Image (cartoon, rainbow, N blue to C red):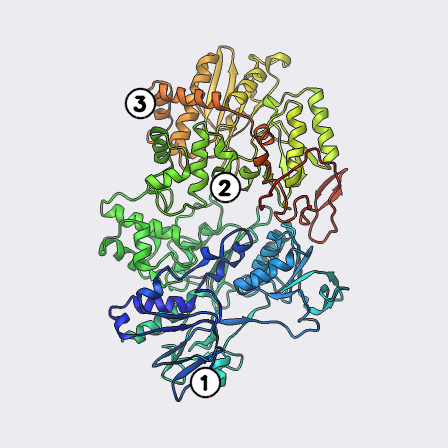
Amino acid sequence: MVGQRFLEALFEQEGASERWHVTVLAEEPLPSYDRMRLTSVFTGTAPEELALCPPGFAGRHGIELRLGDAVTGVDRQARTVRTASGHQVDYDELVLATGSYPFVPPLPGHGTEGCHVYRTLEDVDAIRARAAKARTGLVVGGGLLGLEAAGALGALGLHTHVVEFAPHLMAMQIDAAGGALLRRKVEALGVSVHTGVGVERIDPGPDGRVGAVKLSDGTRLAADLVVFAAGVRPRDQLARECGLPVGERGGIVVDASCRTADPRIHAIGECALAADGKVYGLVAPGQAMAEAVARELGGQEGSFTGGDTSTKLKLLGVDVASFGDAHGRAEDALEVLYANSRAGVYKKLVVDADGALLGGILIGDTDSYASLRPLAGNGRPLPVSPEQLVLPAAAGQRTLGAGSLPDDAVVCSCHHVSKGVVKAAVGEQGCTSLAAVKKCTKAGTGCGSCEKLLGEIVTEELGAAGVETARGLCEHFAQTRAELYEIIRVKGITTFTQLMAEHGSGQGCAVCKPVVASILAGLGDTSYILDGEQAALQDTNDHFLANIQRNGSYSVVPRIPGGEITPDGLITIGAIARDFGLYTKITGGQRIDMFGATVDQLPAIWRRLVDAGFESGHAYGKSLRTVKSCVGQTWCRYGVQDSVALAIELELRYRGLRSPHKLKSAVSGCARECAEARGKDFGVIATAAGWNLYVGGNGGTSPRHADLLVEDVDRDTLIRTIDRFLMFYIRTAERLERTAPWIERLEGGLDHLRAVVVDDSLGICADLDELMARHIQGYEDEWAATLADPERLHRFSSFVNAPGTPDPAVRFVPERAQIRPARADEDGHRLPVPVGIALAGKASAR
């Protein structure tokens, strides 16, 4: 990665192609790729998607690229290098970007078959091949790489242990309190964590491969696969062998310009011992070194005096960030803490006596990382008190943003780009979009953690210049979600491929694909949830028509309109849960959730539900979930209207309606409000004269009461108003925008909404009515449609190469006469259950 950045920085300079002929000698068989994203390969990312070397890059700059031919020696006197194949290359300047190698502790059994390191794409292939025959994995090391490796093993379906010699996880980046919270979050995901102990030896099993691991405290853990992620060591062997000085603990000694003791040889990245006495094991410092050497070879002054060791990662689904003096080692360091173990949030800011930010740790909520990190170490007091910056929004509003940063603040640490450089790209170089700024400055093209802040700076600068900013959905579409909705509707576009060809660029991404699929499905094309290209656009829940749970099992939620269910219906659900060994729970939306189904069991469960008259409850989709109700006037002595009948009618009317976000509703039979209708996206409360309609409410982390839209209306007016409200929301809301923030964002707010859907101020109500009618007419139950199509059933298999094989990651233990997912320290089981439908044909990978 560092070598590729050196090449880019070198050839960004005018005349570099004429001045330098570059030969790149690489041991690996592939050009440079993003090692930071290795784990994503385990979850379906194609290796070519990790490529960092753009197509044609070498050819454009006359670079000779020799892959799969490692350098074996350097002759400093003759100024030549030789490779394993015997090839010899002369040099005027030599840049060593050999990186590091994984450290494998010299403990007994470390070479046993089934022991692996985790560094390259070849390592990924080897781990994946071994994991196919394993049930339990163990990772040696609980740092950044170790937790990444644990996530990889979990993605392969292995029960995983992490062994860390330090007292807590990620000891280099976070403190003990943060480590304790991180441990709880990691263990909650099914990973068994062992800290304060080391691995004493690895014992082979009867087949000669890894069978067990003994820890220093005497614990013996069964393991079929071991991954060493106990740190790295500088790959400095070439320098040692040709007589260049190396550090006592490794690393090629370089000066501030990254030049070794031989003025013709430079070293950059993890193989180098920088002038400040540190070996930097992160991408950002390595890229800064690369840029320094590129400037030197371009005839300019280049220096590296230290690197940013900040990190922001999502490890095993947990957001973790660390920056600056996170451990408070400075003499006058003071700590400001906020911890909420129930919510899984830990924040610590380290400041000096004058209120200047020195560093910090963020776990569980890292939204403020991008704006805080550039302020660490600048010596200036924070623009607001640190207490405000760690407290939740409800207690102390965050006020830091792009405007709070000085121009010399480094907003992109990967490429050392300051706010002032970003502003100059907009104001002086004519960049009018975030994409243009990224291309011009390289900011945001590294780890990506600064992208949101960059967007704020770009928007702020363009706004100050009176330039309208781009509001595109993503880099592939310049249009917003609402604009894409209108394009698809008006032009009659029926596929993502057609939309991309006519209005987009590239191949699409995880942002635009589900959005377009939702729009197409919302316009009546249910195949966009169920079939071929369409199904591939969805996330896991939509793809399998069920909610995936923490241990890889799925939950099944049949629709129970209004919460009304017959005794026979209850018996059917109970029998299914009993026969398949599922956990059952009454939800807050008056439905019954059945947890613990494996992917191959889903069709069999659906068959029994569909045969009994049930259908999908769409608990997995961005769509209507439930319409909750009280018993209304039929049973309650306070009720003034039949709330159950109306709730059933509304739920059946809007079932399957795809929207920008999930929708929840309720109907209360009187003002006592037992159904909690004012906490829903749309809620109805009965009055003596009719019905009141409330919109824009929600629970969650930012609860909001709904606002009264119309009052005392009859049933027909009520339903017509809800129809129009929902379709106007679906047409104009942005991606993942709930109704509450959507109404707040509307210019004119609730008054404008009322004018549109009640008074038809825009003249679009007939169109909204027609769109709702199209949805109602085109509705089909997705479970029944899948069961009726053998091709759709092909995807429901745990493993592509072994249909019918149970997923070893899905394990349970008994609790309160039911089951729950097994924790990492428990021996779980998968109850054998009957299968009610035969699956045939080629399976698809999960």
Give how far apart the Cα atoms at labels 3 and 1 are.
76 Å
The answer to whether residue 60 is visible is: yes
Per the rendering, the mark at residue 536 is: 2
Report x, y in % for residue 845. Answer: 58, 46
Q: Secondary structure at mark 1?
A: loop
**How many residues crowd around disc 3 within 10 Å: few (fewer than 14), some, or many (20 or more)?**
few
Choose top left, top right, bottom left or bottom right for residue 427.
bottom left
Image mark for residue 244: 1
Q: Which amino acid, mark 2?
A: Ala
**Amino acid of disc 3:** Leu
Q: Quadrant of residue 560?
A: top right
Check disc 3 and report its element: helix, strand or loop: loop
Q: Position of residue 107 (x, y in %)?
A: 68, 73
Residue under the point 67% across and 47% down: 807
Question: Element at badge 2?
Answer: helix
Dot placed on the residue nearer the N-terminal end, 3 or 2: 2
Q: Residues within 10 Å of mark 1 (few under 14, many from 20)?
A: some
Query: Could you tell me the amino acid type at mark 1?
Result: Leu
Whether tag 3 and tag 2 are in contact, CB under 8 A, the answer is no
Q: Residue furthest top?
A: 689
